[in-house]
Image (cartoon, rainbow, N blue to C red):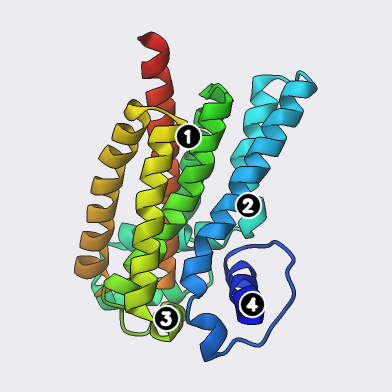
Amino acid sequence: MKWLLETAAVAFAMFSAVPVPQFEWNQKNMRYTLCAFPLVGAVIGLAWWGWAAAASYLALPAILRGAVLCVLPAVLTGGIHLDGYADVSDALASHASPERKQEILRDPHIGAFAAIRLCVYFVAYFALCCAAEPTAAFLRCAGIGFVLSRAMSGLLLTALPIAEGSSLARTFASAADKRRVGRILAAVILACFAGLYLCGSWQTLLAAALVTAPVVWYYRRTAQRQFGGISGDLAGWFLVKMEFWLLAAMLLAQVGVSAI
């Protein structure tokens, strides 16, 4: 039991800003850390539910409710995935060689293209949060989306080649029992898709599946062709994209169900 708690604590210490007990990272508690990664998404989903309930009780305007929903993932994760999104945005905008792109990923400074794309992302994500009707079904599906994006990110980290010089991604991928971790995360992904159907509708499931496939394909193609493999920054870039498009899919499904 102790190693399970340590594994979860390592996952939250690495992938969130949620205060947890600190343990020394070792081979035992890092072996299944990626399996605990989706738990961070579950916490974000619960935070969304709590804030939506509070906003409804206080009869707050939709723009205020949406603003807090928009920033909650960044607050609870400490912006770790957005940092990767910004770095990859700068690297892709350089149109340089894979080696030069890797150098840009390691540069601690933020470039103009990263700033622009972060602004565009937050405006678009804010719009989605404001447009969504915070029904119980939608909030359940949104919470599943946060879990799904992290399960998918962890699975691909064990399945795709790691780029040279990517120490963080290699650390977690090397420490993981890839076969078992992959199976566990695949089961979580299937459970998430089942949950989208049970908590939402077949439109929700279909919309989520339709956005997941091209985002995963683009991630794999971009990582291999433009960076020589995946890295921690690319994993963060992928997760941010997955969260955005899953939310857009759920909003589209909600609109579609309402129109029927």
Seen in the picture, residue 91 relative to 135 is either above or below; the reply is below
**Foreground pick, 224 / 189:** 189
Q: The C terminus lies in which quarter of the figure?
A: top left
Return the residue at label 2: 43
Q: Secondary structure at mark 3?
A: loop
Mark 4 vs 3, N-terminal side = 4
Residue shown at the point (45%, 61%) measured from the top left: 236
The quadrant holding residue 135 is top right
Return the residue at label 4: 1
The quadrant holding residue 219 is bottom left
Residue 89 visible (yes or no): no
Seen in the picture, residue 96 relative to 248 is either above or below; the reply is below
Mark 1 vs 4, N-terminal side = 4
Name the amino acid, label 4: Met
Return the residue at label 1: 124
Q: Nearer the viewer, mark 4 or mark 3?
A: 4
Q: Rate crowding at label 1 as few (under 14), some (14 to 19) or many (20 or more) other CA atoms within 10 Å.
A: some
Mark 3 vs 2, N-terminal side = 2
Q: Nearer the viewer, mark 1 or mark 4?
A: 4
Discs 4, 2 touching: Cβ within 8 Å? no
Q: Nearer the viewer, mark 1 or mark 3?
A: 3
- Spatial CA distance of label 3 from label 2 is 23 Å
**Foreground pick, 57 / 163:** 57
